[in-house]
């Protein structure tokens, strides 16, 4: 992935990713050429999983249930 690709994703509204599958502030997929180069689950496949564990890192972390297919984590654990 190049810095130009990352800038293009941000310009199209991407605010985060799960397994390099980018999403916007509503949890909707932001498609890119990267989708064809990544081997792994898609966001739609992840949303269909009953139990998902999320790990976040960075200076600005926001928890949004839409990123988990509308499922709010029952017991979030935060560690600085």
Image: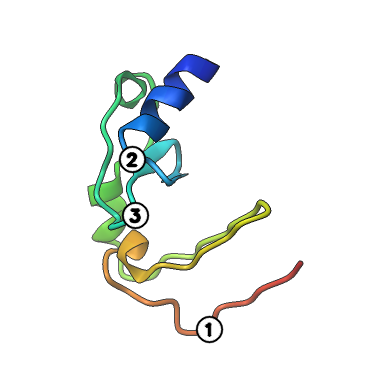
Q: Does residue 3 lie above or below 51 as drawn?
A: above
Q: In this view, does 73 lie to the left or right of 29?
A: right
Q: How crowded is mark 1: few (under 14 residues within 10 Å), some or many (20 or more)?
A: few
Residue occupied by mark 1: 75
Q: Can residue 37 be seen in this view?
A: yes
Percent x, y for residue 46? 32, 54
Tell me the number on the disc at residue 13: 2
Q: How far, Cα to Cα, is label 3 from label 1?
A: 22 Å
Q: How far, Cα to Cα, is label 3 from label 2?
A: 7 Å
Q: Is residue 39 visible?
A: no
Q: Does residue 62 lie above or below 30 as drawn?
A: below
Which is more toward the observer, 56 or 24? 24
Which is more toward the observer, 8 or 80? 8
For the point 61% across and 57% down, the residue is: 60
Percent x, y for residue 25? 34, 54
Residue occupied by mark 3: 25
Location of the C terminus by quadrant is bottom right
Among numbered discs 3 and 1, the one appearing first in the sequence? 3
Q: Are marks 3 and 1 in contact (CB under 8 Å)?
A: no
């Amino acid at each position: 992935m190049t810095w130009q690709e990352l800038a293009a994703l941000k310009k199209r509204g991407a605010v985060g990713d799960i397994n390099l599958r980018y999403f916007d502030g509503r949890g909707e997929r932001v498609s890119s050429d990267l989708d064809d180069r990544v081997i792994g689950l898609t966001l739609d496949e992840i949303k269909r999983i009953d139990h998902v564990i999320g790990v976040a890192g960075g200076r600005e972390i926001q928890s949004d249930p839409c990123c988990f297919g509308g499922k709010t984590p029952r017991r979030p654990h935060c560690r600085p």
